[in-house]
Each structure stands twice: as structure tokens, then as C-alpha cells.
Image: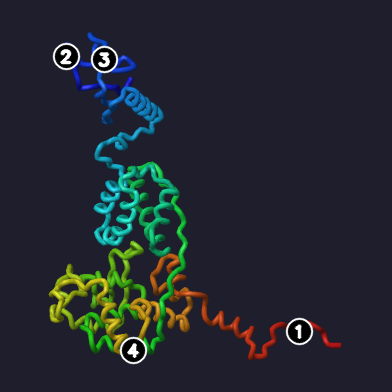
Amino acid sequence: MRGGIYSRQRCSICGNLFIDTGKELTCPNHPEITTNRLYVKFGNVYHRFKSYDNASRFLTGLRFKSDEKTLDERDYRRDNPLGFISMSERYLTAIKLKTAKNNKSHIDHAQNFFQNRNVKELKCGDFEDFLNSLTLDDKTKHNINSTLHVFYKWMLRRQEIKEIPEFPIVSFVEGYRRTVDKETQRAIIKEIKQIAPLKVYLGIKWLATYFSIRPAEMLNIKEGEIDTGNAQLYFPTPKEREFKGVPILPEDVEILKSFSLSVPAMPFFRHDGGIQGSIKDQPYGEKYFYKWWKRACDNLKIEGIDLYGGTTHSTVRALKRYYSPEQIKAASMRKTNKAFKHYLGQAEDDEILSIYKQGSATQVLPLFKDTKKSN
């Protein structure tokens, strides 16, 4: 029978190793001599005990799991490779650096709660208790829950686990971004052109023009991904995971030709070193565009408009008056209906206004057709 109970101690009288009698470990020559320093060895599983009964129950459990083919020897290793902390740290080192940076705070919250509990033992209720323990808004809890679900999908793909547990549903109300009309948007961008470096003006102008480009994609574009000859911006690894080429206007091509674009591997949006606190060739930080956007808004006494709302969302909202949702969706290069709905906002304004007009208290309109025949 596989596995057994052993001891490294020897009989104090004759020096023989102890043997398992089924009830205890004793000396074969001196049965009155026993030991309570025991260990179970089963394949690669090794575990110490001070009680024969406990060791025997543990060994029986291992044999049972082995027979039903559910035994995972990693569950019993001292370094606990399937512990939540151990496995999630492996996950963070295995995924893309940028993704790991975004996910780390989510994983940190979960590590503090679960410590090194076995990832296979966590169920839906455990995740629900964890999320309920957080003093964060529902949107952040939803994002943390999504990160953990992706983490478990990663473990399943690597065959670290055999199934993904059910995850709780976290509902939240989608945040609303204030927008501006095109006249106000142009005024802000004109102010940015006057006060900010040319690349900052260009980047914010692009966000307001080419609404298929996300701010993070904009910041990460390299000089070698800008093609002035074909008037294209290339994004090899966008969020949609499909190569994306964005056509650009002739006026932007002319601006780009004023830069050398001689280092293909370098980020285009990087500091020139002429501004205090900036380091030459250091890439722009994720809030650098917003810093200049906010400064321009302050100069113009405009409040409560963030960068993405004032550029991309404002542009899309203005375009709804001239183009169909299908045309705007094609230009946005978004793949999912959910993303598109969030992008365009609520139903078409003209349709809503026509309904409001029918119910107006100040306009006299025939709400119903008169079906009576005149005599």
C-alpha cells in the first residue's frame, strides 16, 4: 500500500528503527519502546506529526484522494505554491508589466484579506465577504472582482486549477462625464496651443479629433508607428487586441513633419528637457495631458470638465447631430456594443425630442387621428 508512517528515531536500547504495527511505531525487539516523533511520507508529500492517530488519519485521507484521483501534492508542500499570495505574485510577474501595474492594487487588497489560503478552496461566498469588507465605491469593487476573475482564468489556462469558482455580481452605476460644445472645446485647445509644448497641443488635439484613440494608446505611440507618408498612426497592440491604423488629417501630417521622427523605438510623446522638472527623453506621465488641459480650463474659467470628457466624449456627442450611430461606431473602432453605448450615451436626441414634442404642454398637436366619419 502506497505511503507510510515513519520515524527517524531509533530504539534507545538496541538502536533499531521503529516499525508500524498499525497502532503505533515500536521497536521490533523492544515493543515497549515507542516514539511520538512521526512523519508521513506519501509520494512527494511529507508531513510531521506527534500523534500516531493523527498521522494515520492523514495518511488514510491521502490514500483516499489518490484513489479517486483528486490528490494534488502541491496542497501539502511547505512553501504553499497554491497559496493566494504565492500564486497571485506569480500571476503579476507573468502578465504584461503595464497590466500588472494596473492590477497590483486590486491584488494587494485580496492578498491582505485571503493571506495564503489555498486558491482552490476559495468559493463565491469568500469573494463576496472580501468585497463587502472593502470601504470602496461599487465601481472599484467591480474592477477588483474582474481582476480576480481574470486571475483565476489564468490559473485555469495553466492547469494550476481544474475549475473556476462562481464569482459574485457587483452592480454599479456608470459614471457620467460632463461634455462641452465644439466652440468651447476649440477655445480650450486653442489656449493649450498658446501655453503648452507643441506635442502636448498635438496630443490633446488628436484626442478631440481621432476619437478611436484612447489616452493610454496616445501616450505609448512610438515614432516608428507614425507614418507621415501614408498619413497613418499605427497601434500594434490596442485594447481590442487587433492591429489598428488610424488615418490622420493633412494638417496634422504637416505638424508631424516638423519633428525628426528619427528614433523608431522611442515614444513620440516625451519631454524635450526645456521645462523645469522634466527630464529630456523621459516619456510623458499618464496625467501630463490632463495637467495642461486643467491649466487651460482654469485660464478660461471653465470648471468641471475632465480631459476625456472634454475631448473624446464631447466630439462624439457633437457628431451625433450629423452622422448615424452606425457611422460613428465604425469611426470609433470599438468592438463591443457595451463600449459603444457608453461612448454615445443615451438614445438619439432627435428621437427623444420628437417624443417630448408630442407631449408638450405649450404646443397644440394632433396626438391621435380622428377616426370618426362625418355624416
Q: Position of residue 197 (x, y in %)?
A: 20, 83
Cα distance in 3D space between marks 3 and 1: 106 Å
Whichever of callouts 3 and 2 sits on the residue coming sooner in the sequence is 2
Per the image, label 2 sits on a secondary structure element best described as loop
Mark 3 vs mark 1: give the one in front. 3
The residue most toward the right is 375
Task: Identify which residue is drawn at 23% across, 72% down.
Answer: 285
Q: Quadrant of residue 249?
A: bottom left
Q: Is residue 72 above or below residue 129?
A: above
Q: Are marks 3 and 2 in contact (CB under 8 Å)?
A: no
Residue picked out by circle 3: 26
Q: Residues within 10 Å of mark 4 (few under 14, many from 20)?
A: few
- Amino acid tagged 4: Lys
Up-down relation of residue 190 to residue 238 (above or below): below
Residue at label 4?
A: 301
Q: Which residue is mark 2?
A: 15
